[in-house]
């Protein structure tokens, strides 16, 4: 495969659409964020019935204007990437597609237009545009900590699940005969979950002395149980924390970002980031 020429049309479009380090790229992405924010506001306002009835035509014209712009933008992103399928199946590629699909679905399914709120996810690009790419690194650290603690969290949730079933069954035995709220074991399990998590809706309450005593124990246990997953994730977060610089550069081949500051090759597709 011949290396792409940075002076060709695709190269210039890639620099404008994907890169935030150049004046043209930053201007384009800033304009894009303004339009995304405006489209999200329009969708929210359109859900207000008095405004929808009064400004139906205005909302419709604005929405189709946004849709036309985002459709062209999405197609240009696919055009200027060497391997468009890699970008189309990436997180931002899927979000970009979902940002335009609801408008066309609304032609046959009117309620689909409210899924346009998905466009708010595209505002994540603000991290790249305003030189806050280090937040992406911090997010990756959190994700890695959650993955590392997945097994421990699974064991913990299994234990909690067994615990609420036991507590729910006990409350059914204690309260079932005198309290209509505890009419079954599943109702008791529901109460145990609400109480153990310290949510406390108050829609189901024990009335017997023994039931209230057990309720007090469950409440106290709730504070201890809430701290367990927090401690597990925090321990993994501290042990796995590593600072690294992240570049805002997007790969010409797959369109993905998140490379190290001194990276020469794309860590997703292996191609050179700055082809000559």
Image (cartoon, grey):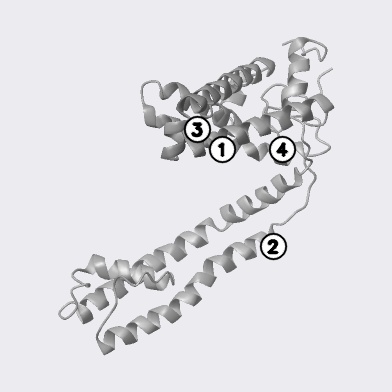
Residue 37 seen from this side: yes
Q: What's the distance in space between the residues labelled 2 and 1, CA to CA?
A: 39 Å
Considering the image in quadrants, where does the C terminus appear? Answer: top right
- Chain-order first, disc 2 or disc 1: 1
User: Residue at horizontal 39%, vertical 72%?
Assistant: 200
Tag 3 secondary structure: helix
Residue most toward the front?
Answer: 54
Q: Position of residue 156 (x, y in %)?
A: 46, 65
Marks 1/3: CA–CA distance: 10 Å
Q: Position of residue 269 (x, y in %)?
A: 67, 27
Q: Nearer the viewer, residue 2 or 74?
A: 74
Q: Which residue is mark 4?
A: 258
- The first of marks 1 and 3 along the sequence is 1
Q: Which residue is mark 2?
A: 238
**Tag 2 and tag 1, C-beta contact below 8 Å:** no
Whichever of labels 2 and 4 marks the residue nearer the N terminus, that label is 2
Within 10 Å of disc 2 (Cα), the crowding (few <14, some 14-19, many 20+) is few
The residue where tag 3 is placed is 116
Q: What is the spatial separation of the Cα atoms under label 1 and label 4, in whole angstroms?
A: 29 Å
Q: Identify the residue at the far bottom of this view.
A: 209
Q: Are marks 3 and 2 in contact (CB under 8 Å)?
A: no
Q: Residue at x 73, y 32 (%)?
A: 30
**How dense is the environment of label 3, judged by Cα within 10 Å: few (below 14), some, or many (20 and up)?**
many
Mark 1 highlights which residue?
41
């Amino acid at each position: 495969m011949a290396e792409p020429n940075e002076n060709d049309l695709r190269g210039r479009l890639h620099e404008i659409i994907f890169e935030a380090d150049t004046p043209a790229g930053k201007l384009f992405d800033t304009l894009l964020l303004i339009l995304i924010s405006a489209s999200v506001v329009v969708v929210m306002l359109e859900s207000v019935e008095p405004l929808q009835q009064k400004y139906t035509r205005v909302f419709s014209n604005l929405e189709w204007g946004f849709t036309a712009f985002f459709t062209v933008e999405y197609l240009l992103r696919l055009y200027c990437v060497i391997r468009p399928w890699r970008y189309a199946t990436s997180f931002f590629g899927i979000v970009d597609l979902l940002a335009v699909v609801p408008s066309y679905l609304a032609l046959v399914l009117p309620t689909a237009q409210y899924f346009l709120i998905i466009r708010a996810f595209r505002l994540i690009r603000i991290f790249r545009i305003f030189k806050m790419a280090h937040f992406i690194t911090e997010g990756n650290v959190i994700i890695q900590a959650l993955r590392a603690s997945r097994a421990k969290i699974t064991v913990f949730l299994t234990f909690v699940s067994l615990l609420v079933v036991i507590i729910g069954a006990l409350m059914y035995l204690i309260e079932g005969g005198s309290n209509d709220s505890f009419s079954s074991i599943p109702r008791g399990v529901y109460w145990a979950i609400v109480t153990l998590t310290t949510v406390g809706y108050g829609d189901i309450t024990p009335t017997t002395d023994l039931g209230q005593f057990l309720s007090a124990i469950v409440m106290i246990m709730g504070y201890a149980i809430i701290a367990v997953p927090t401690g597990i994730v925090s321990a993994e977060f501290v042990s796995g924390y590593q600072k690294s610089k992240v570049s805002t550069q997007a790969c010409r081949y797959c369109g993905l970002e998140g490379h190290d500051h001194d990276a020469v090759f794309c860590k997703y597709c292996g191609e050179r980031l700055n082809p000559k």
